[in-house]
Image (cartoon, helix red, strand yellow):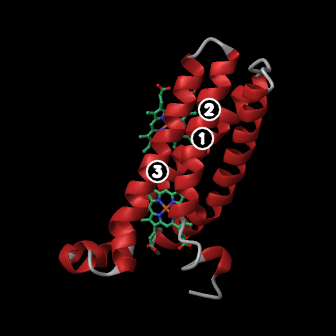
């Protein structure tokens, strides 16, 4: 049995964890930044969990990229795939967009940790996580599969 289907389902379902954690982390960071609050253990913990889940998505995504039949078809004829919106999305756009989003989340975490002033800690997290959230919402294949799909 191929690992493709279970990994795809896991990767697909974990999107909601990433989205929820991002929203919580952003709201906490905004409240902390604009309300000039201290950077608490809870702030640190949500950032840590967000990073772990995001990196798990990265790992699953990379694994899927190597075993996905859709990606395989696309990579077998990249020239044609670039003209097909669906194949191009899976061969290039989802990967590049999500990689950038993962880097934004990782950078937000690292820069927030590195900052010493609590206001800056909150601000780094708020800004980088928001950029990541926008990219992720844009790069999730909402219409094709998953939440709004009637099958497929
Ligand atoms: C392709 C696989 C992965 C790559 C390329 C990757 C890369 C990174 C990088 C660049 C950092 C930042 C290090 C720093 O703080 O300077 C990091 C930290 C971290 N990653 Fe990953 N990671 C991967 C997979 C995972 C997985 C599978 C998990 C756990 C489920 C994970 C959890 C974490 C955690 C918890 C941290 C440190 C958080 C902190 O203390 O700030 N990563 N990773
Ligand atoms: C937080 C980041 C990410 C989110 C929220 C996300 C979300 C999704 C969703 C919702 C699907 C559709 C699942 C389905 O068809 O049921 C998917 C598929 C996929 N993703 Fe991601 N993804 C992320 C990151 C990545 C990364 C970094 C990579 C590659 C390095 C990647 C590679 C793939 C591949 C190869 C597929 C399967 C294509 C197919 O065979 O249909 N994803 N992703």
Within the image, what quadrant is residue 64 found in? bottom left
SS at mark 1 in the image: helix
Marks 3/2: CA–CA distance: 22 Å
- From the viewer's perspective, is residue 105 above or below residue 10? above
Provide the residue designation for mark 3: 59
Tags 3 and 1 in contact by the CB under 8 Å rule? no
SS at mark 3 in the image: helix
Q: Nearer the viewer, residue 147 or 9?
A: 147
User: Which mark sits nearer the N-terminus, 3 or 1?
Assistant: 3
Provide the residue designation for mark 1: 129
Mark number displayed over residue 125: 2
Q: Residue at x 37, y 78 (%)?
A: 85
Ligand 1 within 8 Å, label 3 CB: yes
Q: Nearer the viewer, residue 113 or 5?
A: 113
Q: Residue at x 52, y 44 (%)?
A: 55
Tags 2 and 1 in contact by the CB under 8 Å rule? yes
């Amino acid at each position: 049995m191929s690992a493709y289907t279970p990994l795809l389902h896991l990767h697909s379902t974990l999107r909601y964890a990433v989205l929820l954690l991002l929203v919580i982390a952003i709201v906490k960071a905004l409240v902390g930044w604009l309300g000039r609050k201290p950077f608490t253990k809870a702030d640190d913990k949500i950032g840590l969990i967000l990073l772990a889940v995001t990196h798990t998505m990265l790992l699953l995504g990379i694994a899927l990229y190597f075993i996905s039949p859709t990606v395989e078809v696309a990579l077998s004829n990249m020239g044609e795939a670039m003209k097909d919106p669906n194949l191009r999305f899976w061969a290039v756009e989802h990967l590049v967009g999500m990689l950038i989003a993962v880097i934004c989340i990782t950078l937000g975490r690292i820069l927030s940790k590195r900052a010493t002033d609590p206001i800056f800690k909150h601000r780094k997290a708020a800004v980088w996580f928001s950029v990541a959230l926008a990219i992720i919402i844009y790069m999730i294949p909402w219409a094709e599969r998953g939440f709004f799909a009637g099958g497929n």
